Image: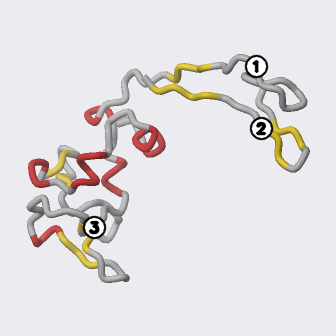
């Protein structure tokens, strides 16, 4: 379940507020919590949107050399194809060819997390 909390604050004497969770003038009241829908957000229902993000290799997980590139600053990253997709993505199944050796960042990119929801594109 993803939870969004709405809040208010005062900035240089000007009250910034949202309709829920605060009063005009900046005074706080009970914080409103809104449950955001995540039903249907799974890797199998997505178009592998996260596989278009740049992935830095910060640990050694055994990524095969053919999938490693060097970025403009000399760091190791996952190689990407000319259209921006990760080179390890099987374009027919939209699954990772090196799942067991995938980079740490890919392992930490949790399904349904805020980062996932920001990139999510349903298959269709």
Mark 1 and mark 2 in contact (Cβ < 8 Å)?
A: no
* Left or right: 61 as drawn, with respect to 13: left
Label for residue 9?
2
Q: What is the C-alpha distance between the residues marked 3 and 1?
A: 49 Å
Callout 3 crowding tier (Cα within 10 Å): few <14, some 14–19, many ≥20: many
Mark 2 and mark 3 in contact (Cβ < 8 Å)?
A: no
Callout 2 crowding tier (Cα within 10 Å): few <14, some 14–19, many ≥20: some
Query: Which element type, helix, strand or loop, lies under badge 2?
Result: strand
Query: Which element type, helix, strand or loop, lies under badge 3?
Result: loop
Of pointers 3 and 1, the one earlier in the residue sequence = 1
Callout 1 crowding tier (Cα within 10 Å): few <14, some 14–19, many ≥20: few
Residue under the point 43% across and 25% down: 38
Of pointers 3 and 2, the one earlier in the residue sequence = 2
Q: What is the C-alpha distance between the residues marked 2 and 1?
A: 12 Å
Q: Which residue is mark 3?
A: 80
Residue under the point 10% across and 72% down: 65
Residue 16 in picture, x, y percent from top left: 82, 39
Which image quadrant for residue 123?
Answer: top left
Residue 63 in picture, x, y percent from top left: 12, 62
Residue under the point 43% across and 44% down: 115
Residue 113 in picture, x, y percent from top left: 40, 36
Q: Quadrant of the C terminus?
A: top left
- Disc 3 versus disc 1: nearer the observer: 1
Residue under the point 32% across and 36% down: 111
- Disc 3 versus disc 2: nearer the observer: 2
Of pointers 2 and 1, the one earlier in the residue sequence = 2
Return the residue nearer the eye: 108 or 89: 108
For residue 63, above or below residue 119: below
Q: Which residue is mark 1?
A: 29
Label for residue 84?
none
Q: Quadrant of the N terminus?
A: top left
């Amino acid at each position: 379940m993803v939870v969004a909390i709405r809040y208010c604050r005062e900035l240089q004497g000007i009250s910034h507020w949202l309709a829920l969770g605060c009063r005009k003038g900046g005074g706080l009241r009970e914080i409103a919590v809104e449950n955001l829908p995540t039903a249907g957000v799974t890797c199998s229902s997505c178009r592998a949107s996260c596989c278009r993000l740049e992935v830095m290799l910060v640990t050694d997980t055994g990524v095969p050399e053919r999938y490693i590139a060097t970025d403009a600053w000399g760091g190791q990253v996952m190689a990407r194809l000319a259209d921006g997709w990760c080179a390890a993505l099987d374009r027919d199944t939209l699954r990772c060819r090196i799942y067991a050796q995938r980079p740490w960042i890919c392992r930490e990119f949790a399904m349904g997390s805020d980062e996932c929801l920001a990139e999510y594109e349903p298959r269709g």
